[in-house]
Image: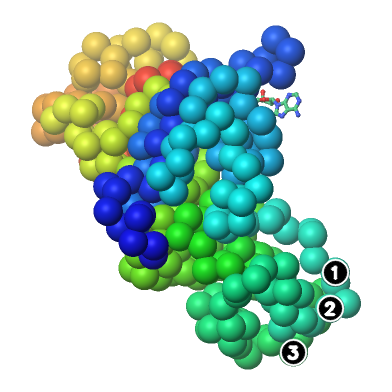
Amino acid sequence: MTSASTKRAFMMKVSGLTKHYGETRAVDGISFTVPNASVFTILGPNGAGKTTTLEMLEGIREPDSGEIEVFGERLKRVTRPVKQRMGVLLQDGGFEPYLKVREILTLFASFFEKALSVNDILETVALTEKSKALVRTLSGGQRQRLAIGAALINDPDLIFLDEPTTGLDPQARRNIWDIVSGLKARGKTIILTTHYMEEAEILSDEVCIMDYGKIIAQGTPKTLADDLGEETMIEFHGADVPSQALERLQACCKAARSDQMMVTVETEHLTDTMESLFAWSREHDIKFHELTVRQPNLEDVFLTLTGRRLRG
Ligand code: ATP
């Protein structure tokens, strides 16, 4: 980490960032501060404006208005020399399938005056054993790790990961989480986008929730969930609840929703609500599948703020 960035409390500060595509307000005047050596996550559904935001921060897209402060410089747009100090995860598909893993990283290293050793990068992204493998033979998770390795080659203090685990299986996703946590432990700042609530909860120091181009909530995963109050969530699957029955349920708890065969009940009085719920299920002949009782999470924050689920 540079001495200048060590002195500042934040790595990046964004004010009033805006990008419109015709009538679409893709990013609509957002502001946030990214602390040093942290994982900062932009969480939101498809089309929320996450990628457009990242592209402006990475210098790929020019903002319509707003200001970006990064590495101690205030900018209207991110310039090439600033870009050189960042690490950007390229989306999968960009690598030549008949090159070997080591050859790809060596190629990326040649783009920079100063680059990390390819062996170190291979170790960081757990691909040492695959160094001689052709790209075409890698699994989806291994390819994504290679892409992250390529983003790290210039030893950036600030790393952008746009939906790094989309489409990966749970094990491959966990491997990427380990890499992200390892980078943070080494003092790197990571700006991540995701539409996986669990990913945001596990990795993030700070989360901002984006919807229709705006930030609708911001904080640590815990403070965001705590803001919902002293609530407990009861959930069950498999029931198509008629509207009349749902209204009866809503009358005996703080809130209840039925969405895509899943019913979510919010309560501040768990025992009373459970009793009412069992009586209600008998009355309406509704069977519970996978009944769970849990504390509120980021999905609930999103649902409460927008009335929609993160993943539709
Ligand atoms: P996803 O999770 O699907 O990648 P996102 O949150 O990253 O979504 P963006 O890709 O930034 O969202 O898109 C925000 C809005 O801007 C969407 O309504 C999208 O259709 C629109 N949009 C994005 N890029 C363009 C473009 N080049 N031209 C016109 N509209 C665009």
Amino acid type, label 2: Leu
* Rendered residue at 43%/19% (across/down): 306
Percent x, y of residue 91: 70, 54
From this viewpoint, is residue 123 visible? yes
Q: Which mark is residue 96?
A: 1
Percent x, y of residue 267: 20, 26
From this viewpoint, is residue 137 visible? no
* Rendered residue at 29%/48% (across/down): 8
User: In this orientation, which residue lies closer to the viewer: 96 or 195?
Assistant: 96
Amino acid type, label 3: Lys
Figure colour scheme: rainbow
- Indicate whether 63 appears above or below 242: below
* Rendered residue at 23%/27% (across/down): 228
Which residue was labeled with disc 3? 132
Q: CA distance from mark 3 to mark 1?
A: 14 Å
Q: For ligand 1, tell me if the residue under mark 2 lies within 8 Å.
A: no
- Do the numbered discs 2 and 1 sit on residues whose CB atoms are within 8 Å? yes
Helix, strand, or loop for circle 2?
A: loop
Q: CA distance from mark 2 to mark 1?
A: 6 Å
Helix, strand, or loop for circle 3?
A: loop
Q: Which mark is residue 99?
A: 2
Of the image marks 3 and 1, the number of the one nearer the N terminus: 1
